[in-house]
Each structure stands twice: as C-alpha cells, then as structure tokens.
Amino acid sequence: MAIVCSTKKQKPLLDEGKMIGGRDVLKVLEAMTPLYVALGLGYGSVRWWHVFTLEQCEAINRLVVYFTIPFFTFDFTSHIDPFTMNYRVIAADAISKLLTVAVLAAWTWCSGSAKSSYSWAITTFSLSQLTNTLVVGAPLLDAMYGRWAQDIIVQLSVVQSIAWMALLLFALEMRKASGAAGFAPAGIEAGAGGQVVAPEPQQAMDVECNTDVAARPTLGSLMKTVWLKLALNPNIYASVLGVIWALIANRWHFEMPRIMEGSVLVMSKAGTGMSMFSMGDTIN
C-alpha cells in the first residue's frame, strides 16, 4: 500500500517580497482623495470665496460635533463583534500609550519649567496617540488591507473614545487647575507709577495659603468636572450605545431594523464629509 504525500504548498496570505504596485496606490488615492476634496472645499469656502462667516463656521462645527459625528461613530461601532475583538492589538495600543505617557512624564519632571512642559506633554500625547482614527483611518486601512483592518481601527476607536478621552479630560482639568493657582495673589497691590508693592511677610503667607486652597480643587471636584464633561459629550454616548447594540445583536443574532438603520445612515453618511469640511474651515 503506497502512501501518497501531498507536496502542495498553501498560498500565503501575503506574498513574501511583494512590492506595492500601482493598483495599491490607486486604492489609497481613491480612499483619501474625497476626504481632502472636502477639506479643500471647507478651506476655500472661507479663505478664498467667503461663502461662510466665522459665526456660520461655528454653527457648522456644532452640527458636526452634536449630530453627524455621533451618528457616524454609532454606525461603525454598532457593526463590530465585541465577542471576537482583537485584544492583543488593543493591549499593544494601550502599552504604546502608557509608554508615551511615561516618557512625557519623565520629560516634564526633568524640565525646568513644569507648567509649560505639562501643557506640551498633553499636546504631544494628543497628536501622537489620539489620532482621527475613524474619519481618516477607517477608509485608509480598508483600502490598504481590507475589512479586517477597518474592524481593528474601529475597535481601537471605541476604547479611545470611552477610556483615553476620559484620561485626557482629567489631564486638561489638572492643567486648568494648576494654571488658576499660578495667578498673582490678590494681596499684591500696585503703587505709584505702577510699581508692585509687596505686602508684609505674614500677610503674604496668609494670602498664599488662601490662594492655594481656593485655586486648587480636590480630586473629587476634578473627577466630578470630568464626568460632567463626558456626560455632555455626544460622541461618548454614541460609542457606548454602539457597543451595547453590538453586544445585544451578536449575542442573540438579529439585525438592526431597517427603519432604524436608515435613520442612522442618513446622518452617518454625512459624517465623513462634514467633519473634513469643518476641519478645513477651522484652519482659517
């Protein structure tokens, strides 16, 4: 009895040594060009053509923040499968963010000017880690790698909206509190010719203590402010409701009713274009 061994190799998911071809570049251009067209229209409508005033641009931004982007976020989030999420990627993203925080914290600690360094640390973390994942990242990765990459970026966006945005708001409130405590005490007066007249030493100590108590809120008050701002953020609601719907739908295997899905899609489809348009008119 002869044993036949199959020598047929399985085709790899990605060919080794495969170069990026013109077709791949075309896919990326097809995904990114419409976004930058909307961005350019938003910029030109204010800068060159004067179609919108600054007050009207503010109204457009509010439309994006309170309506189109929340529906856009809910549309993406509600279609994920929370039971098959890639927790390794989410953990890797969390580790990268924590390492960034550690490096920025060490830089702030070693820097001479703590307040300005703290502000720059928040800005650097926001620009490097809290990127525009859904509006730009989802269509770009879908064109480059396919649906699985888009699903991963949506999962990361959900965690970013719910967890990391809360930490960012806490850091911003800490900066605001430290900035308020840095103003000159009320006991310092201006003398003749605008010269600053310092109070008596005991008075200065009393004023400084009173200022520290009044201008430095407690941890509880900071957390209350952060949670209040999160509660007023419609994008947080969209992410949470999207996850809840995804859990229910994938647990009991049913689809969203058409009347509900159509209502979401009407606003969701405008999310990408309106957000890029709003970003363009904000540049001015």
Image: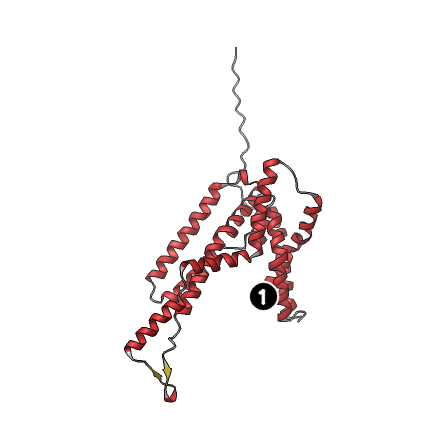
- Compared to residue 29, the image places residue 48 above or below, namely below
Looking at the image, is 88 positioned above or below residue 10?
below
For residue 278, which quarter of the picture? bottom right
Give the side of residue 281 with respect to residue 107, left or right. right
Q: Nearer the viewer, residue 37 or 20?
A: 37
The part of the image, by quadrant, that contains residue 189 is bottom left
Decide which of 245, 108 is in the foreground and name it: 245
Residue at image coords 44%, 65%? 176
Q: Nearer the viewer, residue 254 or 223?
A: 223
Q: Give the residue displayed 31% in from the left and 77% down from the top.
A: 203
Give percent across and percent down for residue 113: 35, 67
Residue extending furthest left? 201
Coordinates of residue 222 in the picture (x, y in percent): 44, 60
Q: Quadrant of the C terminus?
A: bottom right
Q: Residues within 10 Å of mark 1 (few under 14, many from 20)?
A: some
Using residue 16 as the reference point, say whether residue 26 is left or right of it.
right
In x, y percent, where is residue 252? 61, 36
Q: Does dot 1 land on a helix, a strand or a loop? A: helix
Residue corresponding to mark 1: 282
In this view of the protein, can residue 63 be seen by the observer?
yes
